[in-house]
Image (cartoon, grey):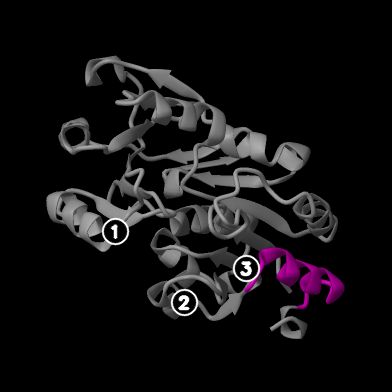
Amino acid sequence: MIKMIASDLDGTLLLNKAQSLPEEIFPLIRKLKEMGILFVAASGRQYPNMKRMFAPVASEIAYISENGALAVDQEEVLYQDSFDRKVAAEIIEAIIGKKDAEFTCSAKDYHYLMPKTERFREHMLYEVKNDCRFVKSLDEMTDPIMKLAVYEPAGITDESVKYWRGRFSQYCTVVTSGNDWIDFIPFGTNKAKGIREYQKRYGILPEECMVFGDEYNDIEMLKSVKYSFAMEHAKDGVKAAASYTAVRVEGVLRKLIQAEGKIEEVI
């Protein structure tokens, strides 16, 4: 029997660069809760953004945000990772110095931003809909830094991934996150850390869990449970980390609900 389901957002529940969840996911989450199955939203997004996105069921689910740097359950912070500030400063300086690149710096309740363009400022405020604080220097970023991310408006290429990994992979984990972002997170921080925390908290075994993801920042999570689904459009390396593939998360959830939580009748 399945007791916990975790899903990535961008590229998994949010398809085609959507910024709002499909309405059909909310009744599915409510039904899963009735069945005693915990739903965990697991994303590189910030916690306040995720709560707004899941507003109809926000108090009925658990959260892994910032690619595993923060886990929050019923408003209780289970853990919060943080960056070495010297490393964070070097990454920020490198992003500022790279043409067209923008960055976000994640604290628990908001992102610090130093936008180079009004377009990026509007993108973060009105399209992504993040809680933001605008600063002029690292000195103004007084809260613990959980994650850094670089945004390249033309999209992430193999060359840009190679560039950022070459610069900083010896100091932190550098991983793609969606079409336009590369995340920098402390070593040991990933979504699987959050999965293990919830397994421990609720006494759930890995073989009682399902997870869904589509990007390289989901690989540890996909490997951490028995029933892992990579999205059909995911890269080959991501699919290789999963046990199964799925076209849409909602279709698998419907089948699981119809099977009353018996995964053997779904796969």
Cα–Cα span, label 2 and label 1: 20 Å
What amino acid does circle 2 point to?
Lys
Which residue is label 2 attached to? 239
The quadrant in which residue 66 appears is: top left
N-terminal-most mark, 1 or 3:
1
Give the alpha-carbon distance from disc 1 to disc 3, as whole Å. 33 Å
Question: What is the three-letter code of the residue carrying label 3?
Answer: Cys
Q: Is residue 4 visible?
A: yes
Mark sitting on residue 209:
3
**Residue at horizontal 18 percent and vertical 38 percent from the top:** 98
Residue 156 percent across, percent down from the top left: 33, 54
Seen in the image, is 72 located left or right of residue 97?
right
Magenta segment includes 158: no
Q: Which residues are magenta?
A: 247-262
Q: Is residue 82 above or below residue 263?
A: above
Seen at 41% across and 44% down, the residue is 69
Q: Are marks 1 and 3 in contact (CB under 8 Å)?
A: no
The residue carrying mark 1 is 157
Front in this rendered view, residue 218 or 191? 218
Callout 2: few (<14), some (14-19), or many (20+) C-alpha neighbours within 10 Å? many
Amino acid type at circle 1 is Thr
SS state under label 1: loop
Count the marks: how many? 3
Whether residue 110 sits left or right of residue 258 in the image: it is: left
Give the image location of residue 261, x and y in percent. 78, 72
Residue depth check, mark 2 versus mark 1: number of the one nearer the observer: 1
Up-down: is 26 above or below 54?
A: below
- Secondary structure at numbered mark 3: strand
